[in-house]
Image (cartoon, grey):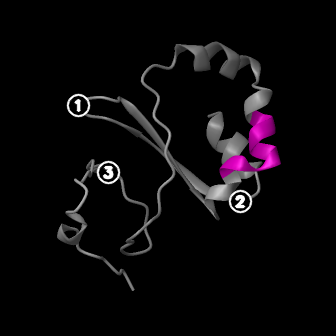
Amino acid sequence: REHMPDRVLRIPGFRHGRRFVSTSGSPRYLALYETDSALVMRSAPYVEMNRNLDAESRFFVPQFRNVVKGIFDLVARAGIGQGASLALLPLSWTAGREAEFVHFDAR
């Protein structure tokens, strides 16, 4: 009710956002925002929004635990609809084993 209108509708460069709740495991909640560029997260309107939180955010943000923020590239998309589920898989590699990762081109 709050962050989608504040970010997606008010800050230039945000395209849309989705929220997810985990059925098990941790973290429990996930918010994904699609932007025109990673630079949106450093833009003056975004920085200003985070500096001047509204009353509700000033109450809730200090209660957040285990917050992880990341900027990622979208590498594949199928169809035009919005899915109702999401699977996140952590990937890591050991130096020198990069060739084991397969390049994926969604075009």
- Per the image, label 2 sits on a secondary structure element best described as loop
Q: Of discs 3 and 1, which sits in the foreground?
A: 1
Classify mark 2: residues with Cα within 10 Å, few (<14), some (14-19) or many (20+).
Answer: some
Give the residues in magenta. 41-49
Residue depicted at x 36% and y 80%:
106
Q: Which residue is mark 1?
A: 24
Q: Residue at x 35, y 30 (%)?
A: 27
Mark 3 or mark 1, earlier in chain: 1
Q: CA distance from mark 3 to mark 1?
A: 13 Å
Q: Which mark is residue 13?
A: 2
Q: Position of residue 35 (x, y in %)?
A: 61, 59
User: Amino acid type of disc 2?
Assistant: Gly
Across and down, in percent, residue 84 comes to 35, 52
Q: Residue 92 at what x, y percent from top left? A: 26, 51
Q: Name the outermost residue toward the bottom.
A: 107
- Real-space CA distance between mark 1 and mark 2, rounded to the nearest whole angstrom: 32 Å
Crowding near pointer 1: few (<14 within 10 Å), some, many (20+)? few
